[in-house]
Image (cartoon, coloured by chain):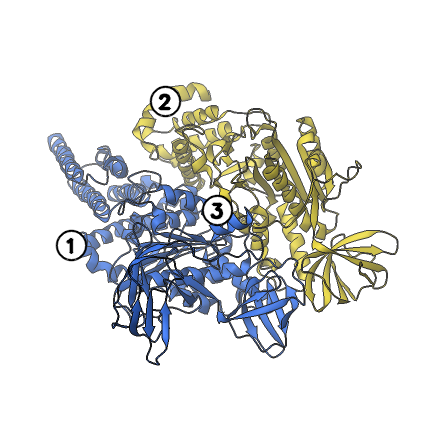
Amino acid sequence: MDKIYSINGPIVKVKASRSFSMMEMVYVGKKRLISEVIGVNSDFTTIQVYEGTTGLMPGEPVVGTGAAMSAVLGPGIITNIFDGIERPLRSLAELSGAYIADGAQADPLDKQKKFDCTIKVRVGDTLSAGQIYCTCPETAVIEHRCMLSPLSKGGEVIWTAPDGSYSIDETVVKLKNPNGETEELTLCQRWPIRTPRPSAERLPIDRPLITGQRVIDTIAPIAKGGTAAIPGGFGTGKTMTQHQLAKWCDADIIVYIGCGERGNEMTQVLEEFSELIDPRTGRPLTDRTVLIANTSNMPVAAREASIYTGITLAEYYRDMGYHIAIMADSTSRWAEALRELSGRLEEMPAEEGFPAYLPSRISEFYERAGYVKTLGGSEGSVSIIGAVSPQGSDFSEPVTQNTKRFVRCFWALDKSLAYARHYPAINWNTSYSEYTDDLADYFKKNVAPDFMQVRQEISNILLEENRLMEIVKLMGTDVLPDDQKLLIETARAVRVGFLQQNAYHKDDTYVPLSKQYLMMKITLEFYRLARQALADGAAVDSVLSLGWIEKLIKIKYDIPNDKEEMFDEYSAQLKSDFEKLNGGAAVGA
Amino acid sequence: MELKYIGLNEINGPLVALDNVSGIGYDEMAELRLKDGSRRLGRVVEISEGRAVLQVFEGTKGLALNNTVTKFEGKPMELPLSKEMLGRIFSGAGKPIDGLGDIYPEKFKDINGLPLNPVSREYPRNYINTGISSIDALMTLIRGQKLPIFSGSGLSHNKLAVQIVRQAKIADENGQDFAIVFGAMGVKNDVADYFKRSFEETGSLQRVAMFLNMSNDPIIERILTPRCALTCAEYLAFEHNMHILVILTDMTAYAEALREFSSSKGEIPARKGYPGYLYSDLASLYERAGVVRGSTGSVTQIPILTMPNDDITHPVPDLTGYITEGQIVLDRTLDQSGVYPAVSVLPSLSRLMKDGIGEGYTREDHQMCANQLFAAYAKVSDARALASVIGEEELSVTDKAYMKFGALFEKHFIDQGFDVNRSIEQTLDLGWSLLSTLPKSELDRVDDEHIQKFYDPEKARTELGL
């Protein structure tokens, strides 16, 4: 039997053993702590323990499982809350009380619960990897589709159970594979968390992940199957932005990974999401949400694993043909977990103590996103939105820089915006999205033919303002000519009225693309008329005294989301106001 | 049979190593007895077959390879706990040092605590009225929150902490179930005295448990101090259903102790020499604040830390800010101009505020008033920056209005004084008065209904004495 030789924090070594393989899941000690083999040589096997090692002694047993660290995949995942290694936290609370004791064990999925299954195959059918053989309603909005594991060789169906209620461990279909062996299929399967699940092919990205957040949807949109990073110092609203996206984005399923973050935030998600109703389905948001909570005070090795557990769950649902969005808050804590473990392994550090393999790990993670054709033949996607917490708010630190290389959407949070309580504090000048061109066709077809043009004009106003602000900072607005004063004021309307969005306002928390478009459109209409008026000789003060800037700023509250026809009234009013202005000027002359 | 080991094999800084040991667990406590009869405590920080590395809390001064006898306790460090701990003073390692003898323990608990299951947490919602306008209105403290004070050497953070303790209506009406746990890590004797005297003056000394590790006490003991304090706090809060306010000062000294300990263990440093696990380590302390389902008690933390060179990007304030639910930042310029409390409004924040204010908690207009004050004060700094370049005379009318607002805001709202205790109504009304000195069109975070109700320049002029 293999025994513990040494213990240093979460790292345990076993001397001269030949019984373990790399990345194998093992149980360490008498408490059977869940662990993973991370290094093997002829002298030592190095193991990282996913739980606290207090009280562990050299000489205690180490038992292998023969399999890699795997997630159990089956109905019962949605609405659940797991820790980083897929232990269900609700069951743990029932077992060991308010605090998570070492060695506490519970089955990831409820083995007692019965699901109403419909068998989708008949005796004589051939089934290949990724094909669906059984479905059952998992929540009111998600139908769970049990698929043949991608590892299976497939085969001919030789027996099926009748439709009815089954628990996850009951056999519903039997297969005879090409070698003549019988394979029994239940409602669940296992998958090693560090291996990406295969798909038939990657499809080009052409659909946006609509979030209802104006600065994201119009300035730096993300695509379904895309990747985005939200870097920002503390207090700039990373978590808040992630919560908003998790609530409102049009994915079918949300996997929310609380990786080394605050316990109270997870509690907030739990409470808030069970109360909030998804406007598309009329059901609580929890019905489409899985939470992975490995808070900052939970074991650091499990924090490292939580990211992989989360993406494995997401890929599993993608293979059923769903669109998944992953919120990873925060990937910096994950990188720090890597650093901590690397330090304990006495590896040679690269930048700022981070291991040299940091960039490759980050890219491996983000590359698991994508819009794919699944093995079963349907389409699904995994989009990843990762928060980054740069040390000292310095975007040049290794995690931010390496993340920037592997994501195509960058939403930079800005401290000075957050200080002025401009939320979401996404800086429109430093943020970008590489998906804009990929998504142009979608916007043209589904929102408005001139959407891209309107969007560009709004961007230009902001860009121009940014340039003028250099002068304003030195000399004040008074020295500017009238047309530039008008631009500064219009830009203010864009910033305060359009980019800033109130997450606590019932209408403003989620704004459909069509309203976003109309808001931009009327702002541009004002700008066009106002410039015309200036050209016709009106003074900028008389243009501004029409009060339209204030009106544009409040449009987000004054026009409810379901009353877009009011924009026509506004537009008519705008025109008549300017006609009056011109008329007045003519009389004066 | 009890095994004792004679002698040591290696001494290095606060660490000692023993060879040929067996049956010892990771994190286990040990007692080292010296020839002269004195005892020291140690903890196993690394163990392999036959060799254990111990960290000695009282330091290794006077230890030799042949003058000690080591006894292992067979369990991690536990703190004896009792309700009688209130009114007592302990060393940083939890030993009574007030000469009143040992406490009679009702329970022993591992000082490292265990991670709290997120599903067992209750989301904190009850606000604590501190009577300090800047905090109540703009960064409201919530029961069960961890809200640090980011300060610098020489600023009035201690005074502010005392004022919060004195004025905070943290308890329910009867006030019976409220207590303070005070943990001092590496503070000057004067500071500890100041707190002790202040608790005495406010008559709350009987409700305070103090854990003191002075700046000249061993650094290794400093690593235990906040853990002892929090274990005591958790016990009182969740087993005796009390509302506990924990004040920890100074977290920077704690982090430095951790760095010293880490480097003597030969660990690979991350930023500024601090160990790579500083974040996890700090989190294991801060995350012990909260409200647990099934208990009516709460642990609220106000850690105080001094930013070296007033640098908020230094690893200690930086990582703290990422863990805690907001921060109160003190500002040296304000302090020098005589403003007390010198709260720097813009970088300060309370994350839990939004759910603990408004109708049913404070007042329905609270959020709007706070948002507008923040937005307006942010513009003040822009106007000031501009004025420093082109001179105040050249500013536009709006910018001038902001300059005036800024001065009034600092004079009436922030500069409150040590003895003034304002109710939340007074604070919010004052906030609206200040906003009323601005042109109506500048209030872009307030809806018309509230402008109607609260915008009143006339009233503002009389109230602010203009």
Report in which chain the residue with disc 1 lies: A
Cβ atoms under marks 1 and 2 closer than 8 Å: no
Give the residue furthest to the right: B36
In the rendered structure, the answer to whether residue B204 lies left or right of residue A108 reads: right
Q: Amino acid at mark 1?
A: Pro
Report in which chain the residue with disc 3 lies: B
How far apart marks 2 and 3 lie (CA) works out to: 47 Å
Judging depth in this view, the residue of A264 and A400 nearest the camera is: A264
Which residue is located at x 26 percent, y 64 percent? A120
Judging depth in this view, the residue of A533 and A233 nearest the camera is: A233
Q: Which residue is mark 2?
A: B456
Q: Position of residue A430 (x, y in %)?
A: 36, 55
Report in which chain the residue with disc 2 lies: B
Chain with blue colouring: A
Q: Position of residue B418 (x, y in %)?
A: 59, 28
Q: Which one is closest to the eye, mark 1 or mark 2?
A: 1
Which residue is located at x 60 percent, y 34 percent? B242
Q: Amino acid at mark 2?
A: Asp
Q: Which residue is mark 3?
A: B119
Q: Amino acid at mark 3?
A: Val
How far apart marks 1 and 2 lie (CA) works out to: 47 Å
Residue A224 appears in view: no
Q: Residues within 10 Å of mark 2 (few under 14, many from 20)?
A: some
Chain with yellow colouring: B
Disc 2, SS? loop
The earlier-in-sequence mark between 2 and 3 is: 3
Q: Position of residue A121 (x, y in %)?
A: 26, 66
Which mark is drawn over residue A449? 1
How far apart marks 1 and 3 lie (CA) works out to: 48 Å
Q: Which image quarter: residue B359? A: top left
